Image: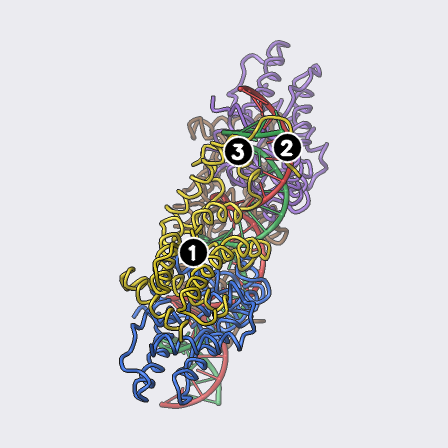
Chain colours: A purple, B brown, C blue, D yellow, E red, F green
DNA sequence: CCGTAAACGAGACGGTACGTCTGGTCTTTGG
DNA sequence: CCAAAGACCAGACGTACCGTCTCGTTTACGG
């Protein structure tokens, strides 16, 4: 490894302060108006301390945001429809937090512009969502609700896409009824 | 109105050159690295000529991009599934053009950050997509494939969301098979 | 020339404001604590306006300082000693101004570190001082006070050097008596 | 005093390495581009080892430079002119060394900006030069070459100033002829 | 057919943020 | 307690971009 053996170690409180400050600024002003100086000032840190950890502004926002978007495998609720509903609720909750609302659209733009960031996005965010979907589908197969599992990418797109569009583009109907309607229709779409 | 009565009229070739230059720059370098100076230089125009037409960079990109995203009402293909397939193909084609690939994610970030832009986005892009969806659903009801039409926003999210996710996030499976799979499952989801 | 033919011309008031602001900041805080941001703020200008005119901080300070160090040919006072006294007084006045006191030592360091700046320094400041010395010597020869003129560089060093040392290093004796003593001794040194 | 009584004694090799590294960097890149990190790296030392010895960058450069500028009382050569010549040669040699050429102008800027440093400069460098001048003058008085000694500060300025200007500003004529010419004229200036 | 008004290319303007670098301090491990 | 290593804060550096403004010139329309 290239881990240094000597010298002053990184201060974990600085790590935390930087990420917390980033989230604060994102929540208050949104991605477009986030500045590195503002984050540094808020964190009580120097800019060098930030750039020692993250090479660019995009990496910083990525790190501060993606960590909070982490999903847990949804608990078994007894049926495919309710499992999907739980998963959708979880995604809506994480992607709909005040911080996420301010940062995710900008983050998506960064990710689609930077292959390196895109690769990391695949391995963390996308992979994690697909794990959760796989778990739900496996349970449905085990219950006998499904004969064969649909293409994972298609189902992923069918689940995450509508949530994304509703959160960042439409946001008109009531949230829970949207989640319920979506879960029901997805179950139908999958079970044919 | 604020229509001027006298003075030199706007040169339409400048209009066209600006939009063409914007699309070129978007395609080559993407939204993040598009600069107004680059567009002006490419168009052989001054920056004032751009700002006379578009108040901000966002408006310029919006105008250059959204015009090409315009959908036509899909022709009647005889069934709901094939109608949906045609609509999805159309959306994939317009949103998947080289220009759109470079600009849409950034444009979405702008839209979600600027309420004024969001309103215009609703009235043009979103409304147009929903018109097409409504036409397809009406035909399905008329054919007797559907009893009652689902909530428009939910179906819109169900259709546009997966397309968006596949284009800008996943893009792994083959395009036509994705479109086919998605159309089939949407038809199932709608007809129950 | 590479003078641009089109475009907005430089605003002379900005030129003046930048130089005036530079002199103000030099006088108030000295060279070591002068910052480009402070100059820009004081001038009511953007940093780009400064860097469009001066490539580096050194060039800016050089331009702002050297202009004020310009000497006039001393008037004929009737004798070599009094001519030298007048010249020394002039140098003491220009190099001893509040702005010069704050900037000259730093400027000398820049000049001796940057050959390009040194060349310009030779052609303006140094050449101008030597013109004045030459004029004084010529008059002395014409009066018959001198048979042959001493080496110009040596006399230049003999005149400017002590002034420099007194101003920036010693500064203990009373100024006019120093000038008088120096002028007398230089006249002796020259006339043998 | 703040002399430590216990613990590990300072490593004299580190002392030497720091000063040697400072002189190397000064010679190679000049004062303006000397950084503490560069000195530390070159010395194979940590920055703390430097700051434990010198409070500021200025003090470090001062220490590294001034030590080499130390003059010895010039030996009696039999006449005022030759004594002055010997002293001038010594000053030219010390202030004209590669290290001094790179550091003295910057050092002068520091000294004139920082009263504390100026005081130490007076007590070491300036005082030492004046000791040498005094010794030369005393000998001249003793020989009967001089009736009364001139003002020490004025003579100091008359001697050191020209040397400084020639070394750092003009540097055109041949060195030894400059020294000879200067010594002769100073002797004339002093003896009237 | 001439004057007015607004368009045009070019590029300077004030302002803001970027990512880098430096100075001087602090904190670790190890001798 | 001292050593090297290197993280820390603060803040200046020079660059890039935005949206505005100013130049000198060109081009339509109305009187």
Residue under the image location 51 percent in, 62 percent down: C169
Q: Find disc 3 in the rendering and name its residue.
A: B165
Residue under the image location 49 percent in, 36 percent down: D15
Query: Which secondary structure lies at badge 1?
Result: helix
User: In front: C164, or A112?
Assistant: C164
- Left or right position of D180 against D119: left
Q: Find disc 2 in the rendering and name its residue.
A: D4
**Residue E10 x, y percent position in the rendering:** 38, 66
Which circle, 3 or 2, is nearer the viewer?
2
Q: Find disc 1 in the rendering and name its residue.
A: B19
The answer to whether tags 3 and 2 share a subunit is no
Residue farthest toward the front in the current orientation of the protein: D143
Query: Which secondary structure lies at badge 3?
Result: helix
Q: Is residue D58 above or below residue F29?
A: above
- Left or right position of A155 against E2: right
Mark 2, Cα crowd under 10 Å, few <14 / some 14-19 / many 20+, is: few
Query: Which secondary structure lies at badge 2?
Result: loop
Q: How far apart are labels 1 and 2 at the CA level?
A: 75 Å
Q: How far apart are labels 3 and 1 at the CA level?
A: 27 Å
Chain letter behind tag 3: B
């Amino acid at each position: 490894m290239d881990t240094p053996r000597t010298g002053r170690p990184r201060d974990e409180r600085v790590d935390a302060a930087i990420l917390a400050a980033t989230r604060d600024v994102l929540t208050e002003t949104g991605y477009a108006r986030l500045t590195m100086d503002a984050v540094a000032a808020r964190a009580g840190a120097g800019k060098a301390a930030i750039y020692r950890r993250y090479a660019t502004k995009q990496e910083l926002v990525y790190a501060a945001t993606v960590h909070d978007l982490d999903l847990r495998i949804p608990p078994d609720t007894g049926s495919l429809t309710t499992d999907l509903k739980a998963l959708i609720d979880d995604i809506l909750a994480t992607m709909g937090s005040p911080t996420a609302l301010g940062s995710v659209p900008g983050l998506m733009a960064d990710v689609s512009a930077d292959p390196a960031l895109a690769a990391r996005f695949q391995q963390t965010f996308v992979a994690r969502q697909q794990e959760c979907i796989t778990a739900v589908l496996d349970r449905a197969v085990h219950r006998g609700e499904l004969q064969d599992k649909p293409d994972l990418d298609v189902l992923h797109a069918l689940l995450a896409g509508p949530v994304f569009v509703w959160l960042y583009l439409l946001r008109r109907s009531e949230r829970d009824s949207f989640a319920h309607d979506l879960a029901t229709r997805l179950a139908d779409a999958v079970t044919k």
